[in-house]
């Protein structure tokens, strides 16, 4: 939940199940959007290094029709507004970099674990499917009713090959104003730790589920199987005298299957952790109006090689973020 121009926006993520034909259409969309992002980024970098000129997103957007009519006619296969949205996202990435909220924008690769693009409009969400321009109606698990006007829809494919649609809606209602006065019994302090992920001033001790640690044996087994196949592929590459840059050509279907198995094992750990954090943050937000937590330098603490795995496993930052937006929705406050 975010407050933009004093209106409440809410994002809901749905699982998509495209057919084989629809998966190919989505792959084309991913590729076209990725190409436009990379070309726009290269143009902006070249304009600055050669002429100290900052190209605006509107200048680059005006070039899209020229590209389609000229040397890149295959861009017509993608939705025009999705291509324009990629340029707007690049412009936002530059602003985030200069305002020190993120790193410098980088080029995207078809080998990246996550692929995505966004529709600014013309998307319909029905009871069991979502209609996407240039793709058509895709079977979806619409587990929650959407309230309000659809603002944007971001379609993504993760490392496991699963497809999702994140729908951002605006209900038209003003954002909840923060409460000024709080009841003493509705204020709680929490201590973040490793033995117990959260210990509250009201006596709550959550324990530490250690999702990653519990799955470590499975993760090791699958990662080692993948590593053996990759080393064998490298040996075949060296035996034929092919350059290492073409190593991916020797990655067969067995390596792809093992990569998917490793990714799915990590996905299960992530889903279990997120589910536990959502339930815990809901409990804390429902029972309290103010939650007070210590500010931790997690990045610095991760440099301790003895505790880095345990700190990453417990996920303090993700938990605090979930508590914060749930409190903000009801007018509460995280201190």
Image: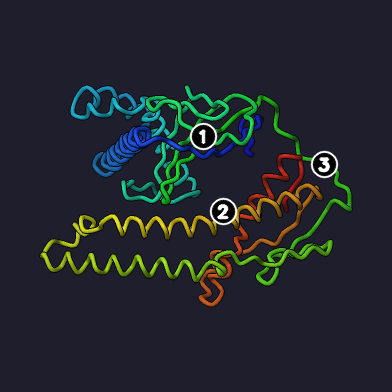
- Please indicate, yes or no, whether residue 54 appears anywhere in the rendered image: no
Determine the image quadrant of residue 126: top right
The residue where tag 3 is placed is 180
> Crowding at label 3, few (<14), some or many (≥20) Cα neighbours within 10 Å?
few
Taking the image as shown, residue 266 lies to the left or right of residue 107, namely right
Horizontal arrangement in the rendering, residue 71 relative to residue 300 (left or right): left
* CA separation in Å, label 2 and label 3: 36 Å
Q: Earlier in the sequence, mark 2 or mark 3?
A: 3
Depth check: give the residue in front, 252 or 134.
252
Q: x, y percentage for residue 136?
A: 41, 25
Residue 64 x/y as whole percent: 29, 26
Secondary structure under badge 3?
loop
Q: Which residue is mark 2?
A: 271
Circle nearer the N terminus (1, 3): 1
Q: Which mark is residue 140?
A: 1
> Where is residue 279 shown, x and y percent of the image?
70, 52
Q: Residue at x 78, y 50 (%)?
A: 290
**Which of the 4 quarters of the picture holds residue 250?**
bottom left
Q: Is residue 177 shown to the viewer in this render?
A: yes
Inter-mark Cα distance, 1 to 3: 42 Å
Question: Pointer 2: residues within 10 angstroms few (<14), some, or many (20+)?
Answer: few
**Mark nearer the viewer, 2 or 3:** 2
Mark 2 element type: helix
Say above or below: 288 vs 193: above
Count of number-bearing discs: 3
Tell me the element at label 1: strand
- Residue lying at the far right in this picture: please name it: 184
């Amino acid at each position: 939940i975010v407050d933009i121009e004093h209106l409440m926006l809410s994002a809901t993520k749905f699982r998509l199940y495209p057919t084989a034909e629809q998966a190919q259409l989505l792959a084309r969309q991913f590729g076209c959007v990725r190409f436009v992002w990379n070309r726009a980024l290269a143009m902006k970098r070249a304009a600055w290094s050669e002429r100290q000129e900052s190209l605006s997103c509107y200048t680059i957007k005006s070039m899209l029709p020229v590209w389609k009519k000229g040397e890149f006619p295959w861009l017509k296969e993608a939705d025009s507004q999705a291509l324009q949205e990629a340029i707007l996202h690049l412009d936002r990435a530059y602003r985030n970099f200069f305002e020190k909220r993120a790193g410098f924008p980088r080029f995207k690769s078809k080998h990246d674990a996550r692929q995505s693009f966004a529709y600014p409009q013309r998307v319909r969400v029905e009871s069991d499917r979502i209609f996407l321009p240039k793709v058509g109606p895709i079977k979806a698990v619409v587990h929650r009713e959407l309230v309000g006007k659809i603002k944007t829809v971001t379609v993504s494919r993760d490392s496991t090959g699963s497809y999702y649609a994140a729908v951002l809606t605006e209900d038209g209602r003003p954002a909840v104003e923060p409460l000024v006065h709080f009841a003493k019994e509705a204020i709680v302090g929490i201590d973040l730790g490793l033995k117990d992920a959260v210990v509250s001033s009201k006596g709550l001790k959550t324990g530490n589920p250690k999702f990653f640690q519990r799955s470590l044996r499975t993760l090791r087994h699958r990662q080692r199987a993948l590593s053996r196949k990759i080393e064998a592929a490298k040996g075949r590459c060296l035996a034929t005298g092919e350059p290492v840059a073409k190593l991916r050509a020797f990655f067969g279907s067995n390596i792809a299957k093992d990569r998917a198995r490793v990714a799915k094992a990590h996905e299960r750990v992530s889903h279990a952790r997120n589910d536990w954090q959502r339930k815990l943050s809901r409990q804390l937000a429902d029972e309290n109006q103010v939650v007070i937590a210590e500010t931790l330098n997690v990045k610095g603490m991760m440099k301790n090689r003895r505790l880095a795995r345990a700190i990453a496993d417990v996920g303090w930052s993700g938990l605090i973020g979930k508590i914060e937006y749930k409190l903000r929705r009801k007018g509460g406050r995280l201190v």
